[in-house]
Amino acid sequence: MNIADGELMEGVLEDRGYAIATGPEEADVIVVNTCAIREHAERRVLGRVGQLSGLRRARPSLKIAVAGCMAQRMGDDLLERMPAVDLVVGPDGYRGLAEALDSVGAAGSGPDGKSAVDRRLSVVDLSLDENYRGLEQRHRSDVTAWVPVQRGCNHRCTFCIVPYVRGPEKNRAPAEVIAEIERIADSGVTEVTLLGQTVNSYSHGGWSFARLLREVASVPGIRRVRFTSPHPNDVTEELVETMATEPAACEHLHLPAQSGSDRVLKRMVRRYTRATFMEKVEMVRAGVPGVALSTDLIAAFPGETEADFEETLDLVAEVRFDDAFTYRYSPRPGTPATRLPSRDSVPDEEAASRLGRLIEATRAVQAEINRAEVGRVVEILVERTARREGMVLGRTRANKAVAVRGTPAEIGRYLTIRLTGTTGVTFVGEIVADGETEVFASDAAPTAALADGMAVPARAAGGWRP
């Protein structure tokens, strides 16, 4: 979402005549795009702005803006803490970003006679209908595109700051989404990821998320469609059927569990139990055989006992997630969890220990799954050069990273490769065929034999066939 927001702000500013600078030293304006999900992210932002303050002292005409969720949460307090910051703008203020920058800034007195310090500005009003309609996102990648279809969230999980910094759920009109994806496909990009805070709760004028996914998957030129981040409660049979029958829909689902303990889930206000979560897992795996599942897990939520934590470890063992994003609980000011009794806080040493054990458990499962996949033939879309010289990095339809020998010329191409090894997290492979020329037509979806081993349809001249 932050990448998409950055691209949106680039579009807004470019429309007003700005151009992307090669580095901070050459910039007239620096916009620091922020996240407020975890305290660590906010500390990094403060450190980064502190570094940029030196540029401001050397060049007083430089304008520094802090945008995004942290800006929304802190507002005027951020201006007080960081004297070098001219503008604080929340997610609903991006439309007016250029005008706001025009109104702040240069050293000395402005046309209104006010000094620069008097013309600092905070734009943090939330709008009930701002979903950025009519604004063009500047997609940076020639390989894959992030497309927001939903802003805000109607869930009120007690640990989460999102509803308070992005407001209630706002869904884009489906025609607008489809038109944007058609433009993306016309530009040569073949993979898109649909974004939303709880993306599968999308609803607009009778359109469900499953219907939107079907239509996006049918756009000519689009070969892969992903989406993130769904909520378990909104995983429906219709969605699973769409994932199973639309060839462009990738065989990967991110399904945030957060905890394996019903007691903790209730305190988090997740609105599902472990049993109902497992029902969703079973439904997805039955409908999309071989689907890769990833998740989010929080350790040391207030009141979590050792027994509760053991239930989370047990969930990891039972589900066997292909990947997991693990976190130690981070208090976010203004969220309901911060009002829980202080005696419920898990001591720092214990919290760190639990996170370490959780990481160890999830990585062990991931390594076992990935070792079992060595030798398989899969399709990857090459995204970028790898750290190792002479290698490029791509992803399978199941969202697994694979490094193969190649040059930058391979970026944006589909390759059929054999997995030859794994570190436990990523793979190494060897090219079997060039997916562009030997396996697929230019607008084709993966064939059954080469789509990460999934039995999915392939496009023929007369339509879809098994």
Image (cartoon, rainbow, N blue to C red):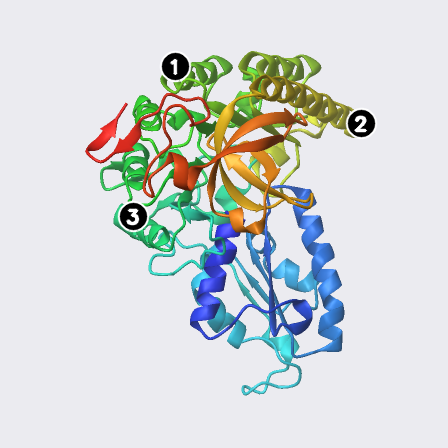
Q: Residue 349 carries which label?
A: 2
Q: Is mark 3 on a helix, strand or loop?
A: helix
Q: Which of 363 and 453 is in front in this view?
A: 453
What residue is shown at x 52% (from left), y 36% (from top)?
Answer: 395
Q: Nearer the viewer, residue 23 or 383?
A: 383
> Badge 3 local density, few (<14 within 10 Å), some, or many (20+)?
some
| Circles 1, 2 touching at the beta carbon (< 8 Å) | no
> Badge 2 local density, few (<14 within 10 Å), some, or many (20+)?
few
Give the side of residue 347 with respect to residue 245, left or right: right
Q: Nearer the viewer, residue 166 or 177?
A: 177
Q: Which amino acid does label 3 sit on?
A: Ile
Q: Is mark 1 on a helix, strand or loop?
A: helix
Q: Which of marks 1 and 2 is in front?
A: 1
Q: What residue type is labelled 1?
A: Ala
Residue 22 percent coordinates (x, y): 62, 68
Q: Is residue 249 visible?
A: yes
Residue 304 vertical position relative to residue 97 in the rendered view, above or below? above
> Badge 1 local density, few (<14 within 10 Å), some, or many (20+)?
few
